[in-house]
Protein backbone atom coordinates (compact mmCIF):
# COMPACT_ATOMS: atom_id res chain seq x y z
CA UNK A 1 0.00 0.00 0.00
CA UNK A 2 1.40 3.39 -1.04
CA UNK A 3 1.13 6.02 1.73
CA UNK A 4 1.70 9.71 0.97
CA UNK A 5 0.42 11.26 4.24
CA UNK A 6 1.17 10.36 7.82
CA UNK A 7 0.82 11.86 11.30
CA UNK A 8 3.24 10.72 14.00
CA UNK A 9 4.25 11.79 17.49
CA UNK A 10 7.82 11.87 18.70
CA UNK A 11 9.72 12.62 21.86
CA UNK A 12 13.35 13.46 22.42
CA UNK A 13 15.17 11.76 25.27
CA UNK A 14 15.19 13.12 28.81
CA UNK A 15 18.47 14.17 30.33
CA UNK A 16 19.94 11.83 32.91
CA UNK A 17 19.82 12.86 36.57
CA UNK A 18 22.84 14.18 38.41
CA UNK A 19 23.80 12.06 41.42
CA UNK A 20 25.15 12.43 44.92
CA UNK A 21 28.31 10.37 45.36
CA UNK A 22 31.45 10.57 47.50
CA UNK A 23 35.06 9.78 47.11
CA UNK A 24 35.85 6.52 48.88
CA UNK A 25 38.98 7.23 50.87
CA UNK A 26 40.45 5.10 53.64
CA UNK A 27 39.34 6.27 57.08
CA UNK A 28 37.27 9.03 55.42
CA UNK A 29 33.74 7.87 54.48
CA UNK A 30 33.00 11.16 52.76
CA UNK A 31 36.22 12.07 51.08
CA UNK A 32 34.59 14.77 49.01
CA UNK A 33 31.74 15.16 46.53
CA UNK A 34 32.18 13.02 43.39
CA UNK A 35 28.70 12.76 41.85
CA UNK A 36 28.77 13.10 38.07
CA UNK A 37 26.40 14.97 35.81
CA UNK A 38 23.71 13.15 33.84
CA UNK A 39 24.05 12.57 30.10
CA UNK A 40 22.11 14.59 27.54
CA UNK A 41 18.95 13.01 26.07
CA UNK A 42 18.98 11.97 22.43
CA UNK A 43 17.51 14.39 19.88
CA UNK A 44 15.09 13.52 17.08
CA UNK A 45 15.94 14.18 13.41
CA UNK A 46 14.16 13.49 10.14
CA UNK A 47 16.23 12.28 7.17
CA UNK A 48 15.51 11.95 3.44
CA UNK A 49 15.96 8.53 1.84
CA UNK A 50 15.25 7.01 -1.60
CA UNK A 51 12.35 4.85 -0.54
CA UNK A 52 8.90 5.94 -1.68
CA UNK A 53 7.15 3.25 0.37
CA UNK A 54 8.79 3.86 3.72
CA UNK A 55 5.77 5.73 5.14
CA UNK A 56 3.75 2.51 4.93
CA UNK A 57 6.26 0.96 7.32
CA UNK A 58 5.19 3.40 10.03
CA UNK A 59 1.41 2.98 9.81
CA UNK A 60 1.38 0.34 12.54
CA UNK A 61 3.55 2.31 14.96
CA UNK A 62 3.38 6.10 14.77
CA UNK A 63 5.28 6.91 17.95
CA UNK A 64 9.03 7.53 18.07
CA UNK A 65 11.20 7.99 21.15
CA UNK A 66 14.86 8.92 21.31
CA UNK A 67 17.01 7.40 24.04
CA UNK A 68 17.20 8.99 27.49
CA UNK A 69 20.49 10.15 28.90
CA UNK A 70 22.13 8.04 31.56
CA UNK A 71 22.32 9.17 35.19
CA UNK A 72 25.65 10.48 36.45
CA UNK A 73 28.16 8.07 37.95
CA UNK A 74 30.52 7.93 40.84
CA UNK A 75 34.05 9.31 40.67
CA UNK A 76 32.76 12.42 38.88
CA UNK A 77 31.92 10.50 35.73
CA UNK A 78 29.24 11.82 33.39
CA UNK A 79 26.43 9.54 32.33
CA UNK A 80 26.34 8.49 28.69
CA UNK A 81 24.40 10.69 26.29
CA UNK A 82 21.23 9.21 24.81
CA UNK A 83 21.51 8.12 21.18
CA UNK A 84 19.94 10.48 18.65
CA UNK A 85 16.99 9.10 16.68
CA UNK A 86 16.73 9.50 12.89
CA UNK A 87 13.31 9.01 11.28
CA UNK A 88 13.76 8.17 7.59
CA UNK A 89 11.23 9.75 5.22
CA UNK A 90 10.98 9.83 1.42
CA UNK A 91 12.65 12.59 -0.57
CA UNK A 92 10.06 15.29 -1.17
CA UNK A 93 8.47 15.01 2.28
CA UNK A 94 7.11 18.17 3.87
CA UNK A 95 6.94 17.77 7.65
CA UNK A 96 4.90 20.18 9.77
CA UNK A 97 5.03 20.57 13.55
CA UNK A 98 1.29 20.70 14.22
CA UNK A 99 1.61 22.72 17.44
CA UNK A 100 4.09 25.38 16.34
CA UNK A 101 3.49 25.42 12.59
CA UNK A 102 7.17 24.98 11.76
CA UNK A 103 7.68 23.24 8.41
CA UNK A 104 10.67 21.18 7.27
CA UNK A 105 11.26 20.17 3.65
CA UNK A 106 13.42 17.19 2.66
CA UNK A 107 14.51 17.87 -0.92
CA UNK A 108 17.64 15.77 -1.44
CA UNK A 109 18.83 12.35 -0.40
CA UNK A 110 20.63 12.57 2.92
CA UNK A 111 19.00 15.86 3.98
CA UNK A 112 18.56 15.80 7.76
CA UNK A 113 16.65 18.24 9.99
CA UNK A 114 16.62 18.47 13.77
CA UNK A 115 13.00 18.56 14.93
CA UNK A 116 13.23 17.88 18.69
CA UNK A 117 16.07 18.57 21.12
CA UNK A 118 17.03 16.19 23.89
CA UNK A 119 16.99 17.41 27.48
CA UNK A 120 20.21 18.44 29.21
CA UNK A 121 21.60 16.24 31.93
CA UNK A 122 21.22 17.14 35.59
CA UNK A 123 24.10 18.26 37.80
CA UNK A 124 25.86 15.99 40.28
CA UNK A 125 26.82 17.08 43.77
CA UNK A 126 30.41 17.77 42.71
CA UNK A 127 29.06 20.78 40.84
CA UNK A 128 27.85 22.34 44.10
CA UNK A 129 31.12 22.10 46.02
CA UNK A 130 32.38 25.43 47.34
CA UNK A 131 34.68 26.81 49.99
CA UNK A 132 31.75 27.07 52.36
CA UNK A 133 30.07 23.80 51.41
CA UNK A 134 32.51 20.93 51.34
CA UNK A 135 29.85 18.19 51.53
CA UNK A 136 27.00 19.30 49.24
CA UNK A 137 23.97 17.03 49.16
CA UNK A 138 22.41 18.79 46.17
CA UNK A 139 21.94 17.34 42.72
CA UNK A 140 19.46 18.17 39.97
CA UNK A 141 17.17 16.15 37.78
CA UNK A 142 17.70 15.91 34.04
CA UNK A 143 15.61 18.15 31.79
CA UNK A 144 12.62 16.73 29.90
CA UNK A 145 13.19 16.24 26.18
CA UNK A 146 11.02 18.10 23.68
CA UNK A 147 7.99 16.36 22.18
CA UNK A 148 5.56 17.03 19.37
CA UNK A 149 3.09 15.78 16.79
CA UNK A 150 4.11 16.00 13.14
CA UNK A 151 2.23 15.74 9.85
CA UNK A 152 4.08 14.36 6.81
CA UNK A 153 2.86 15.15 3.30
CA UNK A 154 4.77 13.61 0.43
CA UNK A 155 5.17 15.83 -2.62
CA UNK A 156 6.85 13.53 -5.09
CA UNK A 157 10.00 14.80 -6.73
CA UNK A 158 10.55 12.40 -9.59
CA UNK A 159 14.02 12.04 -11.05
CA UNK A 160 12.48 12.03 -14.53
CA UNK A 161 9.02 12.57 -15.99
CA UNK A 162 7.88 10.89 -19.19
CA UNK A 163 6.01 13.42 -21.36
CA UNK A 164 4.56 13.30 -24.86
CA UNK A 165 1.34 13.27 -26.82
CA UNK A 166 -1.33 10.69 -25.93
CA UNK A 167 -0.44 7.16 -27.08
CA UNK A 168 3.29 7.95 -27.28
CA UNK A 169 4.03 4.71 -25.40
CA UNK A 170 4.91 6.29 -22.07
CA UNK A 171 3.04 3.87 -19.81
CA UNK A 172 4.35 0.82 -21.66
CA UNK A 173 7.88 2.17 -21.45
CA UNK A 174 7.54 2.90 -17.73
CA UNK A 175 6.33 -0.67 -17.15
CA UNK A 176 9.24 -2.07 -19.16
CA UNK A 177 11.91 0.01 -17.45
CA UNK A 178 10.67 -0.33 -13.86
CA UNK A 179 8.15 -3.20 -13.68
CA UNK A 180 5.47 -0.70 -12.68
CA UNK A 181 1.82 -1.39 -13.43
CA UNK A 182 0.56 1.69 -15.28
CA UNK A 183 -2.56 1.22 -17.39
CA UNK A 184 -1.88 0.73 -21.09
CA UNK A 185 -4.37 1.30 -23.91
CA UNK A 186 -4.52 2.44 -27.53
CA UNK A 187 -6.73 5.44 -26.88
CA UNK A 188 -6.15 8.98 -25.56
CA UNK A 189 -5.82 9.58 -21.82
CA UNK A 190 -5.41 5.99 -20.68
CA UNK A 191 -3.29 7.63 -17.98
CA UNK A 192 -5.55 9.85 -15.89
CA UNK A 193 -3.13 10.24 -12.97
CA UNK A 194 0.69 10.12 -12.87
CA UNK A 195 2.10 6.63 -12.36
CA UNK A 196 5.40 5.96 -10.66
CA UNK A 197 8.14 3.42 -11.19
CA UNK A 198 11.31 2.70 -9.27
CA UNK A 199 14.51 2.34 -11.31
CA UNK A 200 17.21 1.20 -8.87
CA UNK A 201 16.07 3.74 -6.28
CA UNK A 202 15.35 6.53 -8.78
CA UNK A 203 11.78 7.56 -9.53
CA UNK A 204 10.24 7.77 -12.99
CA UNK A 205 6.81 9.37 -13.39
CA UNK A 206 4.51 8.67 -16.32
CA UNK A 207 2.82 12.03 -16.88
CA UNK A 208 -0.55 11.87 -18.69
CA UNK A 209 -0.44 12.82 -22.39
CA UNK A 210 -0.41 16.46 -23.38
CA UNK A 211 -2.35 17.86 -26.30
CA UNK A 212 -2.18 21.10 -28.22
CA UNK A 213 -3.76 23.79 -26.04
CA UNK A 214 -2.97 22.04 -22.73
CA UNK A 215 -1.26 25.16 -21.36
CA UNK A 216 -4.61 26.93 -21.74
CA UNK A 217 -6.42 24.18 -19.86
CA UNK A 218 -7.57 22.16 -22.87
CA UNK A 219 -7.88 18.41 -22.40
CA UNK A 220 -6.45 17.48 -18.99
CA UNK A 221 -4.44 20.72 -19.09
CA UNK A 222 -2.92 22.48 -16.12
CA UNK A 223 -3.29 19.56 -13.72
CA UNK A 224 -0.77 17.45 -15.62
CA UNK A 225 1.62 20.30 -16.39
CA UNK A 226 1.90 20.95 -12.64
CA UNK A 227 3.00 17.35 -12.14
CA UNK A 228 5.76 17.81 -14.72
CA UNK A 229 7.09 20.79 -12.75
CA UNK A 230 8.09 18.45 -9.92
CA UNK A 231 10.42 16.36 -12.08
CA UNK A 232 14.16 16.97 -12.36
CA UNK A 233 14.43 16.05 -16.05
CA UNK A 234 12.13 15.18 -18.93
CA UNK A 235 12.00 12.02 -21.01
CA UNK A 236 10.15 13.17 -24.10
CA UNK A 237 8.46 10.26 -25.87
CA UNK A 238 7.67 10.56 -29.58
CA UNK A 239 6.11 7.57 -31.33
CA UNK A 240 7.26 6.30 -34.72
CA UNK A 241 3.54 6.08 -35.47
CA UNK A 242 3.46 9.84 -36.19
CA UNK A 243 3.96 10.86 -39.79
CA UNK A 244 5.49 14.16 -38.62
CA UNK A 245 7.53 13.14 -35.59
CA UNK A 246 9.36 16.47 -35.26
CA UNK A 247 6.00 18.24 -35.45
CA UNK A 248 4.63 16.05 -32.65
CA UNK A 249 7.72 16.83 -30.60
CA UNK A 250 7.35 20.59 -31.17
CA UNK A 251 3.67 20.50 -30.18
CA UNK A 252 4.56 19.30 -26.68
CA UNK A 253 7.55 21.66 -26.45
CA UNK A 254 5.30 24.65 -27.20
CA UNK A 255 2.89 23.62 -24.44
CA UNK A 256 5.73 23.26 -21.95
CA UNK A 257 7.11 26.71 -22.84
CA UNK A 258 3.66 28.31 -22.72
CA UNK A 259 3.09 26.91 -19.23
CA UNK A 260 6.46 27.76 -17.71
CA UNK A 261 9.81 28.97 -19.04
CA UNK A 262 11.63 27.07 -16.27
CA UNK A 263 9.75 23.90 -17.19
CA UNK A 264 10.90 24.15 -20.81
CA UNK A 265 14.50 24.58 -19.62
CA UNK A 266 14.65 21.29 -17.73
CA UNK A 267 17.18 18.76 -19.05
CA UNK A 268 15.50 16.66 -21.72
CA UNK A 269 16.20 13.30 -23.35
CA UNK A 270 14.20 12.21 -26.38
CA UNK A 271 12.88 8.66 -26.63
CA UNK A 272 11.65 7.57 -30.05
CA UNK A 273 9.20 4.84 -29.09
CA UNK A 274 7.77 1.88 -31.01
CA UNK A 275 11.00 1.51 -32.99
CA UNK A 276 9.79 -1.85 -34.31
CA UNK A 277 7.51 -0.02 -36.79
CA UNK A 278 9.93 1.60 -39.32
CA UNK A 279 12.58 -0.18 -41.35
CA UNK A 280 16.21 0.24 -40.30
CA UNK A 281 17.02 2.93 -42.88
CA UNK A 282 14.04 5.09 -41.94
CA UNK A 283 14.83 4.72 -38.25
CA UNK A 284 18.40 5.93 -38.79
CA UNK A 285 17.22 8.91 -40.82
CA UNK A 286 14.72 10.02 -38.18
CA UNK A 287 17.19 9.45 -35.35
CA UNK A 288 19.74 11.67 -37.12
CA UNK A 289 17.16 14.39 -37.78
CA UNK A 290 16.25 14.54 -34.08
CA UNK A 291 19.89 14.72 -32.99
CA UNK A 292 20.44 17.60 -35.40
CA UNK A 293 17.28 19.49 -34.44
CA UNK A 294 17.29 18.89 -30.68
CA UNK A 295 20.17 17.39 -28.67
CA UNK A 296 22.44 14.33 -28.75
CA UNK A 297 20.44 12.48 -26.08
CA UNK A 298 18.11 10.63 -28.46
CA UNK A 299 17.23 6.93 -28.10
CA UNK A 300 15.20 4.66 -30.36
CA UNK A 301 13.44 2.11 -28.17
CA UNK A 302 10.82 -0.59 -28.39
CA UNK A 303 9.06 -1.94 -25.33
CA UNK A 304 7.61 -4.64 -27.62
CA UNK A 305 10.93 -6.09 -28.89
CA UNK A 306 13.27 -4.77 -26.17
CA UNK A 307 15.36 -2.79 -28.68
CA UNK A 308 17.36 -0.05 -26.95
CA UNK A 309 15.84 -0.73 -23.51
CA UNK A 310 19.02 -1.93 -21.79
CA UNK A 311 21.05 0.94 -23.27
CA UNK A 312 18.46 3.47 -22.12
CA UNK A 313 18.19 1.94 -18.66
CA UNK A 314 21.97 1.93 -18.17
CA UNK A 315 22.34 5.50 -19.42
CA UNK A 316 19.55 6.76 -17.12
CA UNK A 317 20.97 5.10 -14.02
CA UNK A 318 24.43 6.53 -14.80
CA UNK A 319 22.95 10.01 -15.27
CA UNK A 320 20.84 9.84 -12.11
CA UNK A 321 23.74 8.65 -10.00
CA UNK A 322 25.98 11.44 -11.27
CA UNK A 323 23.35 14.07 -10.50
CA UNK A 324 22.67 12.51 -7.10
CA UNK A 325 26.36 12.83 -6.22
CA UNK A 326 26.34 16.47 -7.33
CA UNK A 327 23.31 17.22 -5.14
CA UNK A 328 24.47 15.30 -2.08
CA UNK A 329 24.72 17.62 0.95
CA UNK A 330 28.25 18.35 2.12
CA UNK A 331 29.10 17.57 5.71
Image: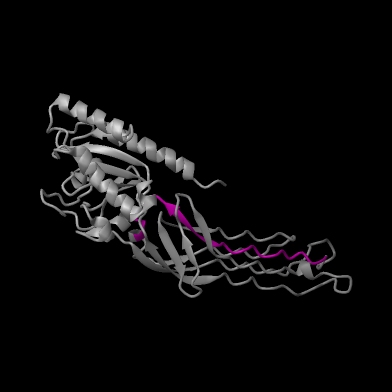
Horizontal and vertical percent position of residue 158 = 34, 50
Quarter of the image for the N terminus: give it. Answer: bottom left
Horizontal and vertical percent position of residue 190 = 15, 54
Indicate the quadrant where residue 300 lies: top left
Indicate the quadrant where residue 95 lies: bottom left
Q: For this view, does 61 lie left or right of residue 1?
A: right
Residue 168 among those drawn in magenta: no
Q: For this view, does 321 lie left or right of residue 148?
A: left
User: At x 28% / y 46%, what residue is drawn?
Assistant: 253
* Front position in the image: 106 or 279: 279
* Front position in the image: 150 or 129: 150
Main SS of the magenta part reads: loop
* Front position in the image: 260 or 107: 260
Color theme of the render: one colour
User: At x 28% / y 60%, what residue is drawn?
Assistant: 222
Horizontal and vertical percent position of residue 108 = 45, 51
User: At x 15% / y 25%, what residue is drawn?
Assistant: 280
From this viewpoint, which residue is outermost toward the right? 131
From this viewpoint, which residue is outermost toward the left? 186
Indicate the quadrant where residue 83 lies: bottom right
From this viewpoint, which residue is outermost toward the top? 281
Residue 48 among those drawn in magenta: yes
Residue 178 seen anywhere in this rendered image of the structure: no
Query: Looking at the image, is 105 positioned above or below residue 110?
Result: below
Task: Read off the magenta span.
Answer: 32-55
Horizontal and vertical percent position of residue 172 = 18, 44
Residue 5 seen anywhere in this rendered image of the structure: yes
Q: For this view, does 234 lie left or right of residue 121?
A: left
Amino acid sequence: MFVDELTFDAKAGNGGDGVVRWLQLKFQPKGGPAGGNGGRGGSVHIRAVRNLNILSKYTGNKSFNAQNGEAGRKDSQYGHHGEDLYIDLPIGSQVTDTEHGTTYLLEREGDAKLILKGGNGGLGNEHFKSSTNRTPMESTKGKIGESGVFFVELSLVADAGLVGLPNAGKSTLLNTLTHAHAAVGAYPFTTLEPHLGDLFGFILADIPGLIEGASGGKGLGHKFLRHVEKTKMLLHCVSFEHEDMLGAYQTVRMELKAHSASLAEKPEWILLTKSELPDEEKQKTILKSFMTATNPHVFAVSAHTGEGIKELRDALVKEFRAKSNEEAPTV
